[in-house]
Amino acid sequence: MNKALAFSSSALLFLLLANLFPFLAFRAQGREQVMNLLHSSFELATQGHPVLAALVAVFILLIPALMLSTLLYLLIPLKRGRYPHNGYRVCRYLFTLKPWSMVEVFLIGVLVSLIKIASMADVILGISFWAYVLFSLCLTAAISAIDRHHLWIWLEHAHANRK
């Protein structure tokens, strides 16, 4: 539980940093375009792809943030020996959301795109890019550190001690 809590806390910090700073900058023919994570979704919408923009925002930001929130919501009280309100339901939500998080897929797509774009423009990786990479690693490590069965046992133990 300690490992998962540490990785979850780190992931939260990296997710916040990933949304505060520039993600990528492109420089070509004297022009520079800087983008952050939210701007990428808005740019897709303005380019005539609103469904894709919504999907990108949901799968790379919203669902991972919800997973992280539910994990912290469960782990912080459990660490203190308390049962989180609606703990069983939240636990089910966590493992229902897990397959829908596309953080790793997004990063692989960005890296492939960068290889192609690098021949046409100068690409500058911003602080947000590295923070998102670290967020991805920490979120994956946090989820991997939690065994579904053990989490359920911790919830049952905390629920039994509550009465």
Image: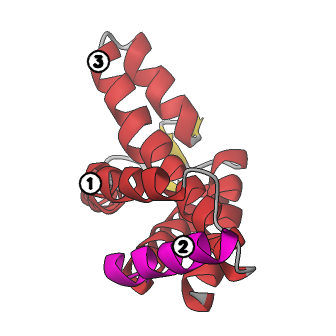
Q: Which residues are magenta?
A: 146-163
> Residue at position x 33%, y 80% from top?
149
Q: Label 1: state its secondary structure.
A: helix
Task: Name the residue carrying label 3.
Answer: 51
The kind of residue tagged 2 is: Leu
* Label 2–label 1 contact, CB within 8 A: no
- Give the mark toward the camera: 3 or 1: 3
Mark 3 crowd level (few <14, some 14–19, many ≥20, 10 Å Cα): few
> Residue at position x 24%, y 59% from top?
112
> Residue at position x 43%, y 11% from top?
46
Q: Magenta includes 155?
A: yes
The kind of residue tagged 3 is: Val
The rendered magenta stretch, by its main secondary structure, is classed as helix
Q: Magenta includes 105?
A: no
- Mark pair 3, 2: CA separation: 27 Å
Mark 1 crowd level (few <14, some 14–19, many ≥20, 10 Å Cα): few
